[in-house]
């Protein structure tokens, strides 16, 4: 067993991200939700600027991991404006490289920013959400 495999679940961390057109925000938290560290960088929409987006994600995650053993991060969800661009192999490779270069062993789940915004605002299974930032989108979420 590796050293990180013997840790108690209380030692585990989760990483959440909000990657938008203007700002990239990352939060590392304990499994119970207590914030540990935050990172922030410039915008990261991979549709318009894939390399810049990957670099912004890398900078924000790097800042959030300062003083944190990356092996403790067991799960990650990143809300991403323009996430459809990750279907392009060259874009996906750039994002995957950022993750591996930082020593993270868990694979991130990339979710549409609409879904992450909805989940952050309510515990309800169904509803509507409006995002009015650098870009704008509205949608309905059903369980």
Image: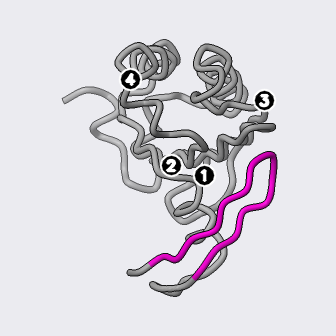
Q: Position of residue 103 (x, y in %)?
A: 46, 19
Please tell me whether residue 14 is drawn above or below residue 142 in the rendered image: above
Give the Cα distance between marks 4 and 2: 27 Å
Q: Say which residue label 4 marks.
A: 88
Q: Disc 2 or 3, which lies upstream in sequence? A: 2
- Residue closest to the eye, 67 or 27: 27
Depth-wise, is mark 1 or mark 4 nearer the camera?
4
- Whether pointer 1 and pointer 2 mark residues with C-beta atoms closer than 8 Å, the reply is yes
Is disc 4 surrounded by few (<14), some (14 to 19) or many (20+) residues within 10 Å?
Answer: few
Give the Cα distance between marks 1 and 2: 5 Å
Give the Cα distance between marks 1 and 4: 30 Å
Q: Say which residue label 3 marks.
A: 41
Callout 2: helix, strand or loop? strand
Is disc 3 surrounded by few (<14), some (14 to 19) or many (20+) residues within 10 Å?
Answer: many
Please tell me whether residue 60 is drawn above or below residue 125 in the rendered image: above
Q: Say which residue label 1 marks.
A: 29
Please tell me whether residue 67 is drawn above or below residue 12 in the rendered image: above
39 is within the stretch colored magenta: no
Q: Position of residue 67 (x, y in %)?
A: 67, 27
Give the Cα distance between marks 4 and 3: 23 Å
Extent of the magenta region: 128-141
């Amino acid at each position: 067993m590796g050293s990180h495999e013997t840790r108690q679940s209380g030692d585990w961390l989760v990483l959440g991200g909000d990657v938008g057109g203007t700002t990239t925000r990352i939060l590392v938290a304990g499994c119970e939700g207590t914030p540990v560290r935050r990172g922030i960088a410039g915008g990261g929409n991979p549709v318009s600027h894939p390399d810049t987006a990957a670099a912004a994600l890398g900078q924000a995650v790097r800042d959030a991991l300062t003083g944190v053993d990356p092996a403790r991060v067991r799960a990650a969800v990143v809300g991403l404006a323009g996430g459809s661009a990750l279907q392009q192999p060259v874009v996906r490779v750039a994002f995957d490289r950022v993750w591996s270069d930082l020593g993270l062993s868990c694979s991130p789940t990339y979710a549409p920013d609409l879904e992450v915004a909805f989940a952050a605002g309510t515990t309800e299974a169904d509803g509507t959400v409006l995002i009015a930032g650098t870009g704008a989108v509205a949608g309905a979420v059903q369980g």
